[in-house]
Image: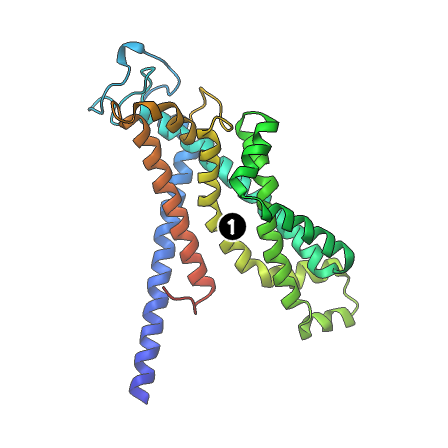
Amino acid sequence: MRLEKSITVRKSKLHKDQTTIKLYVFSALVVVLLLIAVFASQLVPYDPYQQDLGKALLAPDSNHLLGTDRYGRDLLSRVIMGAQSTIFSSLLLVAIISVIGTSIGVFCGYKGGKIDSIIMRISDVFLAFPGMVFAIAVAGVLGGGIMNAVVALACISWPKFARLARGQVLSIKNMPYISAAKLSGSKPAKIIFKHLLPNMMGPILVTATLDIGTMMMELAGLSFLGLGAMPPIAEWGSMMSNGRSMLQTSPWVILAPGCAIFITVMLFNLLGDTVRDVLDPQTKK
């Protein structure tokens, strides 16, 4: 029995150490991505917006590591600059839907009653539609532009966080320490910010981290359809849309931003999975 217990403890410690190492590694890689996005204008080897038709559709070489597009613009420079608009717009979108959705969910879960029923039925209406189709409709009404794409996706993405936050509040608000806080005379605002939010932020944080990749792909999808970033703004989805007709003749034009999306989404998803493992040690792959 002692041997089995010792082996179990060692396995648990090894799993915890591996998870911590993964967290540090993926966090460092995401920080590198964010630094590239922040300092994109200083890192680009060429002007990402300068056109030179004499160098149009050059294959990757020592001068242009990822080649050039149909206007002779350096693709490496445009991919680096595109990180700024793509990553920051995705982070802004996740911040908006997580804050709004969580606020609505906490209010509904704590207040209850008719207001809770009405708002949850409204969220049911949003959840009943295919998200991307609804976003395309809203973005089409608002018109093109990266900020309009963010607004369109925010309109249909908040119910996920509202449902999650409401469920967390319903499971926590009847706990003994919440009852004790009410009996001590604490006001609802104090109970929410001091007791409810700190105990429910784990699932919210994990969902938000995992949602970054999803929102990035949906923003890129809207840009690909012409409902997001407008030319000549360097944005990965828009770059893929502009190069889709040259996939067979000049594949680097679409593969460069496509690989950038793939790598970035993969890193954020791996970070989200690792954060989940850290906050919930019982979760195992």
> Secondary structure beneath disc 1?
helix
Task: Pick out the residue farthest to the top.
Answer: 54
For this rendering, which residue is in front, 65 or 214? 214
Q: Where in the figure is residue 237, as x and y percent of width and height?
A: 42, 31
Q: Is residue 171 above or below residue 47?
A: below
- In the drawing, does residue 117 fall left or right of residue 98? right
Asked which colour scheme the image uses, the reply is: rainbow
Q: Is residue 71 above or below residue 124?
A: above
For this rendering, which residue is in front, 79 or 225? 225
Task: Pick out the residue farthest to the left.
Answer: 62
Q: Where in the figure is residue 118, as x and y percent of width and height?
A: 73, 52
Going 27% across and 13% down the picture, which residue do you hit? 55
Q: Is residue 144 above or below residue 33?
A: above
Going 57% across and 38% down the picture, which residue do you hit? 134
Q: Residues within 10 Å of mark 1 (few under 14, many from 20)?
A: many
Going 35% across and 32% down the picture, which residue do you hit? 257
**Residue that carries the numbered disc 1 in the rendered image:** 208
Q: Where in the figure is residue 280, as x and y percent of width and height?
A: 46, 65
Q: Point out the image quarter for the C terminus.
A: bottom left
For this rendering, which residue is in front, 187 or 280? 280
Numbered-mark total: 1
- In the drawing, does residue 56 fall left or right of residue 26? left
- In the drawing, does residue 18 fall left or right of residue 62? right
Q: Where in the figure is residue 130, as x and y percent of width and height?
A: 54, 43
Q: Amino acid at mark 1?
A: Ala
Going 32% across and 90% down the picture, which residue do you hit? 1
Which corner quadrant of the image does residue 196 belong to? bottom right
For this rendering, which residue is in front, 92 or 214? 214
Which corner quadrant of the image does residue 44 belong to? top left
